Structures are given as C-alpha cells and as structure tokens.
Image (cartoon, rainbow, N blue to C red):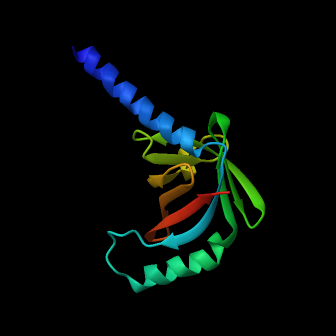
Amino acid sequence: MRYFIIGIALALTACGSGKTNALLQHKKWKVENVSVPPGDPYNLVQVTQAKDLKSGYYSDVFYQFLDDGLFIATIAGQPDTGRYRLISNGRIISITSPNGSRDAEHLVEVVKLDEQSFDMKVKSGDYHFILHTRKQ
C-alpha cells in the first residue's frame, strides 16, 4: 500500500511538470508588462521599480525553454544561455548557469501558464515582481 501511494504521488508530480514543460517549450516568450504581486503590501518604491523595469530593463526581453533543459534569455538582442528544470510539481522553475551549477540559481514561480501567456513571479533586489509574457 505504501509503495502504491508513493507511485501515485510520483505520477502526479510527473504529470504537473510534464504539462508545464509542454506549455513552456519551443515558444518565444516576450515580456510585455511588469507588476507588483497582488498580495504584496503597497510600497511606492516597489511600484516605481515595476514601472521602471517595464520601460527599461524588460522592454526588450525574450525567454525560451528548449529541449534538454536549455534556457535562453535574450535581453536587448543579446542572448544568454543557462539550464532550467521544473520543481515543485512544475510550479517552480530553477534556472542555473549553463553547466547546471546552483551557485547562481534563480527560482521563478509559475503564476499563470497557458498556450498564449506566461506570468512568472521573480525576485529583483528586495522585491518580487510578476513578469507578464506573451507567446511571440
């Protein structure tokens, strides 16, 4: 019985990660908006940073998730590669350096994901932000 329950838990985990991976992969996701997470208390600095990030750093950013865990972030026309893997049943994306070292790991929370849009919660400095992306 114990092995049966463990098997079901593993199958459910694989299904969640598999669905997330299928929706993420082989698309070019363009950042279209940056917002403050709905549950965060109002903070003028965070709100201002979200606006600045949208019109500055994230104004020309694309993300791609490819086969074998390859991740490409293109910022202002300059590609940068890394590795990604899904954890927590596909709710969290771990992004690491190209060699997979977790020394500079970035954890991204999947807030919304469907065929056309991908919203992710990221940490930048002292604050969290939601990056709203669309499939290109």
Quick one: 13 or 114, which is closer to the camera?
114
| Image quadrant where one finds the C terminus | bottom right
> Can you see residue 32?
yes
Q: How many marks?
A: 0
| Percent of width and height locating residue 109 | 44, 54
Up-down: is 19 above or below 79? above
Left or right of 20? Residue 27 is: right
Up-down: is 86 above or below 38? above
| Percent of width and height locating residue 1 | 21, 13
Q: Residue furthest left?
A: 1
Left or right of 14? Residue 51 is: right
| Percent of width and height locating residue 30 | 64, 61
Quick one: 100 or 15, which is closer to the camera?
15
Q: Residue at the spot x=33%, y=20% of the render?
A: 7
Q: Residue furthest right?
A: 77
> Can you see residue 85?
no
Up-down: is 14 above or below 59? above
Up-down: is 115 above or below 43? above
Q: Residue at the spot x=62%, y=38% of the render?
A: 69
* Residue 54 lies in quadrant: bottom right
* Residue 31 lies in quadrant: bottom right
Q: Residue at the spot x=47%, y=68% of the render?
A: 129
* Residue 11 lies in quadrant: top left
Left or right of 108? Residue 13 is: left
Q: Residue furthest front?
A: 116
Quick one: 127 or 27, which is closer to the camera?
27
| Percent of width and height locating residue 2 | 23, 17
